[in-house]
Amino acid sequence: MSDTTDGETVTGPPAAPATGSASVMLLGAGERSRELALAFQRLGAEVIAVDRYPDAPAHTVADRTAVVRMTDGDALTALIDEEKPNYVVADAGAIATDALITIAERGDVEVFPTPRSARLSLDGEGLRRLAADELGLPTAPFWFAGSAEELTAIAQHAGFPLVVKPVAAAPGEGESVVLRPDDVEPAWRRAVSGGRLSMQRVMAETVVEVDVEVTLLTVRTTGPAGPVVHFCEPIGHHQPGGNVLESWQPQQLSPAALDAAKSIAARIVNSLGGRGVFTVELLVRGDEVYFTDVRPRPHDSGLVTLRSQRLSEFELHARAILGLPVDTIMISPGAVQVSYADSDAHAVADSDADSAGDDVADAQVRLVLADALDVAESDVRLYNAASADDGSPWRHLSMATAPDPIVARDRARRVAAALRRLR
């Protein structure tokens, strides 16, 4: 797809590649970070994986590991000064942003995402005001409230239904749909207790009738002529249940909607700056496109790229950060179902079981996998459900490709149905 910066075509080679001796410190060591660590290592980089608890998923593949509380700015700064990485890549929600700003301003370490992006990713109010007020991007009508009384007044003014959510939260976290006045107080309590940060402030948004929710993975790189923005094919997604996310690529859009989506993504990404993958979330109704969110890192709706693209979202992120060439070629339509586990869940087989029990569990897993992988063009990933700072733990991914995205979705659902027998 075309490369643009602020809507204009940019030509020229990308920035000079990093050397094989580059070191990358990943702040966050969950399953997404594990995929990212492997992507950096395949490009010759040394990876230091950091998280608040030992034996995190990315710790198992990293060259070196560290355990610190990443909200502790002094401890984080001391670790970075000790390790002296070339790049610091934040892949977790709760990090001492002020410390990263200070480190970035020193100029001896490149920090990704930019401190501005990191701060706004935790500030839904600031991000929405940037998008709507400063950049003029189309959004659903929205308001912010600092108390249940303010939220009640907003509901009386705006009418129903309203979506109420924390100003700093993962997608869907602490979110409610308010249908009548009696729903306002419970929605307020859910939002202020459900965000990543303890903030007594929520966003209320008018419910917009849309055809599809779309992720437009946008890769920002830098070349001799300036910033360059690359787009992956649009990804459609929905969350039929709290523990399941389904996404597929490509999502067909009208030419007008696709042009609008690219323009919105380029403007918000160029405003945030830096290099890497940005997950831009959009609502689409016919030719109309509304901005809803952007995250300066790979996200779960883009996991379909593990099968559908030549370079996955993780490989694109690593290449862009290291200053290497990228391409967003889709090799096949595909789909993925992500099944999430509770944070206190365990592996499929109990580690305390006796050997006979282990043999039975292994046999059951093999039977289930055989059924799942019997689906044409299918693939699966199974995970231990360890909690992590970079998002909800995955239980398993059910992936499939096909000549048509509708067929790919059907295949991924059949794979997921088989894997649901693993309890």
Image: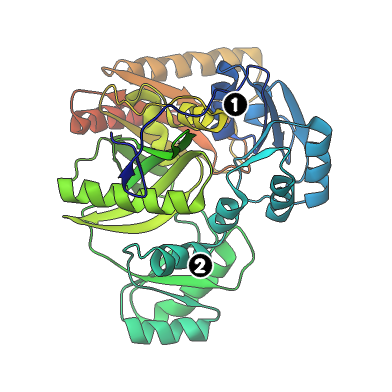
At x 58% / y 33%, what residue is drawn? 33
Task: Measuring from the top left, give residue 169's x and y in whole percent.
Answer: 53, 57
Instruction: Place residue 305 in its image quadrant.
Output: top left
Image-based side of 338 in relation to 31, left or right: left
Q: Which residue is mark 2?
A: 125
Instruction: Place residue 5 in its image quadrant.
Output: top left
Disc 2 crowd rating (10 Å Cα; few below 14, some 14-19, many 20+) is many
At x 35% / y 27%, what residue is drawn? 399
Disc 1 crowd rating (10 Å Cα; few below 14, some 14-19, many 20+) is many
Q: Earlier in the sequence, mark 1 or mark 2?
A: 1
Query: SS at mark 1?
Result: helix
Image-based side of 393 in relation to 140, left or right: right
Q: Which residue is mark 1?
A: 37
Three-letter code, disc 2:
Glu
At x 82% / y 45%, what residue is drawn? 75
Quarter of the image for the N terminus: give it.
top left
Look at the image and tell me whether residue 201 can be seen.
yes
Instruction: Place residue 91 in its image quadrant.
Output: top right
